[in-house]
């Protein structure tokens, strides 16, 4: 296998796409909480006239119960997203990967919230920077790309 990581399930392209109606509202809720976190953090920074790189700011943010609650909400949503067997890779972009078997290698099908469907993939070690269109053959695949 291309990776020593273990995944609870492997997806086909259709299975990943079928899951998007469940995932979209969860990602929307993550975005909502992130907006709240940004706004609350700005309020603390401005209200207490703290420098963004002040050690006191981090202490103050950690003590704020509203911020702590929003952070717990985001963590819970990420856990819920991951519970489907996919991997939440970027909460600010709504980036989710789906483990998939390509030949004898596990790869990631890659979806971002602003995309209509799962239409990209990348090797696990290449990350988002190595994203390719689903129909784009890899150099060493001999032009034969099959997603299971």
Image (spheres, rainbow, N blue to C red):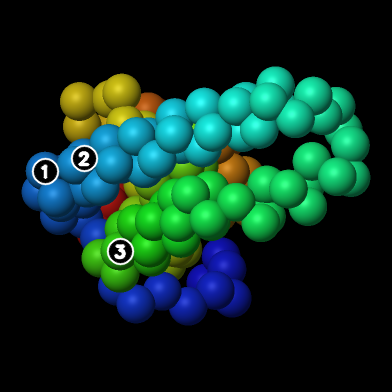
Tag 1 secondary structure: helix
- Nearest to the eye among marks 3 and 1: give it: 3
- In the image, is residue 49 above or below residue 144? above
Residue at image location 25% in from the left, 65% down from the top: 84
- Quadrant including the C terminus: bottom left
Q: Which residue is mark 1?
A: 21
Horizontal and vertical percent for residue 13?
21, 47
Q: Earlier in the sequence, mark 3 or mark 1?
A: 1
Q: Are marks 1 and 2 in contact (CB under 8 Å)?
A: yes
Q: Which residue is mark 2?
A: 24
- Gap in angstroms between the C-alphas marked 2 and 3: 12 Å
**29 and 18: which is toward the camera:** 29
Tag 3 secondary structure: helix
- In the image, is residue 134 above or below residue 102? above
Assess disc 3: are there few (<14), some (14-19) or many (≥20) residues with their C-alpha within 10 Å of its C-alpha.
Answer: some
Query: Which quadrant would residue 135 be assigned to in this image?
Result: top left
């Amino acid at each position: 296998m291309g990776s020593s990581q273990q995944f609870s399930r492997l997806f086909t392209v259709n299975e990943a796409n079928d899951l998007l109606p469940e995932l979209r509202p969860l990602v929307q809720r993550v975005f909502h909480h992130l907006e709240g976190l940004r706004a609350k953090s700005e309020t603390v920074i401005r209200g207490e006239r703290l420098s963004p790189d002040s050690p006191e700011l981090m202490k103050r943010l950690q003590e704020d119960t509203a911020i702590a609650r929003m952070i717990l909400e985001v963590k819970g949503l990420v856990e819920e997203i991951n519970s489907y067997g996919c991997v939440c890779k970027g909460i600010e972009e709504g980036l989710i990967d789906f483990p998939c078997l390509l030949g004898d290698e596990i790869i990631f099908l890659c979806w971002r919230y602003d995309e209509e469907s799962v239409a990209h993939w990348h090797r696990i070690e290449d990350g988002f920077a190595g994203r390719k269109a689903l129909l784009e053959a890899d150099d060493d695949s001999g032009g034969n790309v099959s997603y299971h």
